[in-house]
Amino acid sequence: MGLLALGTALEWPEAKKRADQVRSWESSNPTPVFHPEFGRFMLEATPGRPWGIDFKELLQVEADMRLRFKSMSLSSVTSMSEKIGQTTVDYDLHNWAEDDDVRNGAAPKGFVHMDAMAFGFLVDTDVRWNQINARLRPEYLDPDLVVDEDIKMQLIAGGMDHRLATHFAHLFIRDPIVIFEEDLQSLDLTKTDHFENLQSTNWQHMRFKPPPSDNSIGWRVEFRPMEIQITDFENAAFSVFMVLVTRAILSFDLNFYIPIKSVPPTRPTTPIGPVEDEYEEMSINEIMNGSIGGYPGLIPIVESYLDSVNVDIRTRCELETYIDLVRRRASGELYTAARWIRDFIQGHKGYKGDSVVNDEVQKDLVASVIAIGAKEIAGEGLSAAGVPTLTKLIGSFRSK
């Protein structure tokens, strides 16, 4: 999620002055792949070596999710020269007038001020994208991409494909979040830090990751919307399911592209031209599990794909366990992690219904999550964690 490097980070005013220099040098770097990740707790666990194509290798994903890296960034706040005005409705419509940021106008009354990674307030939202999306400039979502024409021409002149040059020229319209003073002394064409600095801090839903020139790693596309889950089992289930979806798409030559302007909330509520029959608005349940007499659903498509290939019984049964978790989450039968946390907090004797997750509630919530993780790592079965509401999250999966 971000370049890990040692150096003297420039303050934002100075970094802003040097942004054009870095962008110019970025386009001169070979396109790389970088291994370390930005945050400590995330779904972006990178294996020591790429997985193979055999279905049995998918069963190793769950056991491999362990190490994380510690890091946080302040530049995104200092570049704004003020608190980021990102708000969301608090769970019980309670506001805190004693908060300096609220008094200074960073958050309107009746909202929780969300400008960092951790807050200590309970809100009724299941995903980060609802908040992060509000911080993006509208033009970045337009199919007529804004690009740096000078960078684009430089890349094309160097032999890069027109579409690929457009992609990278679009990335380079942004300023780098962090610039290290030591990296500005001279341009080293054997290093890729400048390119990776910008590439790794463009947090898009899908990130194109070219291979390094001196490595056998293939071309990759990173799928980024997934939220970190509480257990390795859940993380593995969603990761493996994504792999199976990509294989089914390639095997059946499917096309799920939808014009970005047709994706809610930008999609018009009334038709403005001929009726489109290539796409329609669906619920998560319909997208994943299908609808009667209509779209079959991603899960049935994946299962049809598995029926068409040679998979041994043990591997197929384990894959079906992952698929079933995704199926039941999509249908609403099982809670999302966010809903489970809200349910835990609201049912706690120390919660006063005021959106504040106090120390007592936090301690018990974290202790429950730690207990779940400890039992999972020990292989004792998640039911041994002694968390009564856990079945709402993962049912009877991994209970023994």
Image (spheres, rainbow, N blue to C red):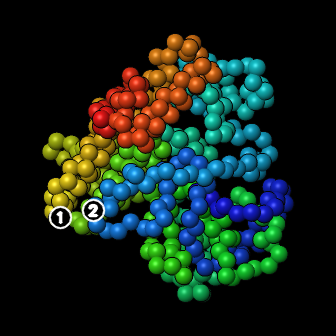
* Residue 271 appears in the rendering: no
Which residue is disc 2 drawn over? Answer: 55
- Per the image, label 1 sits on a secondary structure element best described as loop
Q: Residue at x 28, y 66 (%)?
A: 54
Instruction: Tell me, for residue 309, which label it has, or none.
Output: 1
- Name the residue at 36% across, 57% down: 60
Cα gap from disc 2 to disc 1, whole angstroms:
10 Å
- Label 2, secondary structure: give it: helix
| Kind of residue sitting beneath label 2 | Phe
Quarter in which the N terminus is drawn:
bottom right
Front one among 55 and 27: 55
Q: Could you say which quadrant of the image residue 29 lies in?
A: bottom right
**Residue at the image position 73 percent from the left and 80 percent from the top:** 188
Residues under numbered marks 2 and 1 in contact, where contact means CB atoms less than 8 Å apart: yes
**Whether residue 101 is situated above or below residue 305 in the rendered picture:** above
Quadrant of residue 385 within the rendered picture: top left
